Image (cartoon, rainbow, N blue to C red):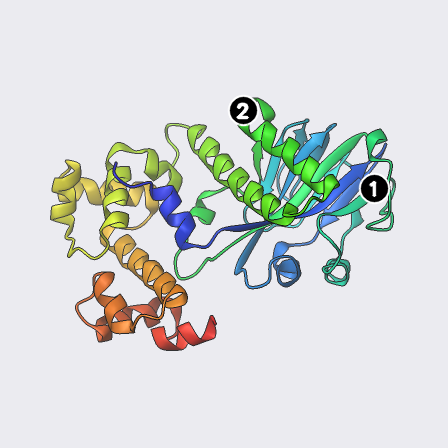
């Protein structure tokens, strides 16, 4: 495979991170976070989709999202909510949570980051000094933002609650958590930038390890990456979106008949290869529209359309706006 398809997608959907809270917890504690969509404008302005994560720097706890059994967390564990669900973090299942409402998040959004917050049967004043050395549990909490539109198959491929135990995280992620904790408390110059990069690196590593742990019969975009034939086809489509692909040619490149490739692609991704290619071309085109000043006509050719008109029709069909109008709306 000549293309790192996961990195390719993450660049295209503009993954970005932010560490917001350094949370110290004593005895019985519980906090309920609102759905990410309610606070997205406060924590990551401009992000179309927001995911929350928590890294356990000390102690233990539980994470829960509606409809699923609570998950036990230990030191060095990471838990993420890829679909932006409301969730509860607690010392034990059943502890009545204090809700961090959207109003509180917006009211404190200009506080220096990461904001210290202490829990002990409720929330202490954010930003106040707290004896964190004596805390039973310490969490480093933050958010990851990305685009969903025009096309982002990764988020749909992730579970509502993604737990990465320390045993599976490896030494590199343990060092990330330690560094995040240090940067959160020492507040050295450049800490915000360091924490943003650490959050993004943590997400990529978590996604990779989730991919490594998928069962053999798993489906979805990540499972497709792992498949010998679908993974190769995805790499080719990502690397050469401008080529006039046919399913026959793609099948020849990966070593399958057109019918076998079609069936395998649908099995993993839920759509045929040419439909995926059409969506990917629009995603690549949207990035060029947003990040460059090139003409719509030149972008159309670069992503595989024979004319500006054909690209504009396809773009509007998927996004709901013509390319030029969409470009103005994102600036």
Which of 38 and 77 lies nearest the eye of the viewer?
A: 77
Q: Residue furthest front?
A: 189
Q: Residue at x 76, y 52 (%)?
A: 100
Q: Secondary structure at mark 2?
A: helix
Q: Residue at x 23, y 73 (%)?
A: 308
Q: Quadrant of the N terminus?
A: top left
Instruction: Name the residue carrying label 1.
Output: 119
Q: Residue 169: horizontal and vertical position, in percent?
A: 54, 27
Q: Residue 103: horizontal and vertical position, in percent?
A: 76, 62
Q: Residue 87: horizontal and vertical position, in percent?
A: 67, 46
- Relative to 216, say whether 180 is above or below: below
Q: Secondary structure at mark 1?
A: strand
Query: Is residue 279 toward the left or the right of residue 152 in the image?
Result: left
Which of 227 and 187 lies nearest the eye of the viewer?
A: 187
Query: Is residue 233 toward the left or the right of residue 292 in the image?
Result: left
Residue 87 shows in this picture:
yes
Query: Is residue 225 toward the left or the right of residue 114 in the image?
Result: left
Instruction: Characterize the local packing of mark 2: few (<14), some (14-19) or many (20 or more) Cα atoms within 10 angstroms.
Output: some
Q: Residue at x 64, y 43 (%)?
A: 65
Which of 201 and 89 lies nearest the eye of the viewer?
A: 201
Q: Residue 86: horizontal and vertical position, in percent?
A: 66, 50
Q: Residue at x 28, y 38 (%)?
A: 231
Q: Cα distance, mark 1 to mark 2? A: 29 Å
Which of 53 and 271 lies nearest the eye of the viewer?
A: 53
Instruction: Name the residue carrying label 2.
Output: 170
Q: Quadrant of residue 135?
A: top right
């Amino acid at each position: 495979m000549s293309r790192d398809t996961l990195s390719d997608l993450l660049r295209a959907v503009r993954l970005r991170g932010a560490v917001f809270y350094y949370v110290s917890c004593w005895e019985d504690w519980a906090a309920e976070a609102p759905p990410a969509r309610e606070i997205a404008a406060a924590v990551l302005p401009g992000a179309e989709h927001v995911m929350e994560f928590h890294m356990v720097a000390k102690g233990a706890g539980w994470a829960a999202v509606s409809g699923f059994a609570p998950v036990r967390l230990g030191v060095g564990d990471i838990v993420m909510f890829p679909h932006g669900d409301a969730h509860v973090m607690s010392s034990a299942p059943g502890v009545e949570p204090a809700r961090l409402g959207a109003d509180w998040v917006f009211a404190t959004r200009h506080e220096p980051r990461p904001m210290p917050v202490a829990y002990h049967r409720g929330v202490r004043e954010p930003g106040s000094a707290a004896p964190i050395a004596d805390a039973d549990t310490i969490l480093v909490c933050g958010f990851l933002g990305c685009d969903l539109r025009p096309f982002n198959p990764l988020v749909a491929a992730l579970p509502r609650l993604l737990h990465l135990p320390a045993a599976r995280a490896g030494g590199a992620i343990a060092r990330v958590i330690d560094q995040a904790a240090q940067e959160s408390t020492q507040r050295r110059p450049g800490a915000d930038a360091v924490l943003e990069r650490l959050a993004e690196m943590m997400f990529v590593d978590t996604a990779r390890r989730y991919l490594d742990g998928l069962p053999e019969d798993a489906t979805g975009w990540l499972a497709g990456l792992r498949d010998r034939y679908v993974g190769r086809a995805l790499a080719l489509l990502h690397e050469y979106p401008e080529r006039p692909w046919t399913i026959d040619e793609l099948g020849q490149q990966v070593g399958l008949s057109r019918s076998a490739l079609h069936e395998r692609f649908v099995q993993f991704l839920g759509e045929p290869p040419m439909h995926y290619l059409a969506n990917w071309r629009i995603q690549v085109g949207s990035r060029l529209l947003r990040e460059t000043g090139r003409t719509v006509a030149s972008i159309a050719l670069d992503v595989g359309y024979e004319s500006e008109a054909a690209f504009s029709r396809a773009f509007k069909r998927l996004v709901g706006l013509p390319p030029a109008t969409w470009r103005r709306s994102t600036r």
